[in-house]
Image (tube, rainbow, N blue to C red):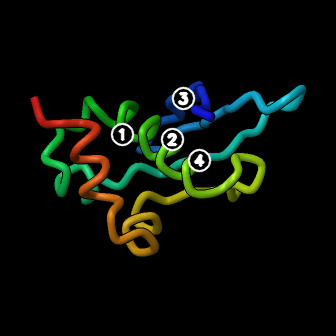
Amino acid sequence: MSEQFDVEPLGDHDYLVRAHVSEEVIESRFQASPAVLAELRLPEADEQRVVREAAQFLAERQPVIDFPQMVDLDDLVAVYDDFISELGRRLPPH
């Protein structure tokens, strides 16, 4: 099942990501690393898109209810070998 995520910018590369699961609202903070954006060859203006796709990527690998309180994109790069290539496929450079 494909989750829908609301992504709210908090400033300084931080985002609040919300997902509605059953009757619950699950919230996690995501930290968008400029290094990840550079690796994806995307402008900083695309951070919110990157965070949304990162949340979707993570939801495909674990239940949203199990998301950590804080998700750093650098950690996703370290844990998932295919993270950068998969996001690159989903978010081609302009």
Mark 3: few/some/many CA within 10 Å (<14, 14-19, 20+): many
Q: Nearer the viewer, residue 47 or 10?
A: 47
* 3 and 2 marks in contact (CB < 8 Å): no
Give the residue at mark 4: 59
Give the residue at mark 1: 50
How many angstroms separate mark 3 from mark 1 (CA)?
Answer: 10 Å
Give the residue at mark 3: 7
How many angstroms separate mark 4 from mark 1 (CA)?
Answer: 14 Å
What residue sits 69% from the left and 32% below the top? 19
**What secondary structure is found at the residue carrying circle 4?**
helix
Residue 67, which numbered label? none
Give the residue at mark 2: 56
Mark 1: few/some/many CA within 10 Å (<14, 14-19, 20+): many
How many angstroms separate mark 2 from mark 4 (CA)?
Answer: 5 Å
Q: Earlier in the sequence, mark 4 or mark 1?
A: 1
Task: Please state which amino acid type lies under the numbered disc 3.
Answer: Val
* 2 and 4 marks in contact (CB < 8 Å): yes
Task: Please state which amino acid type lies under the numbered disc 4.
Answer: Ala
Residue 16, quarter of the rendered image: top right
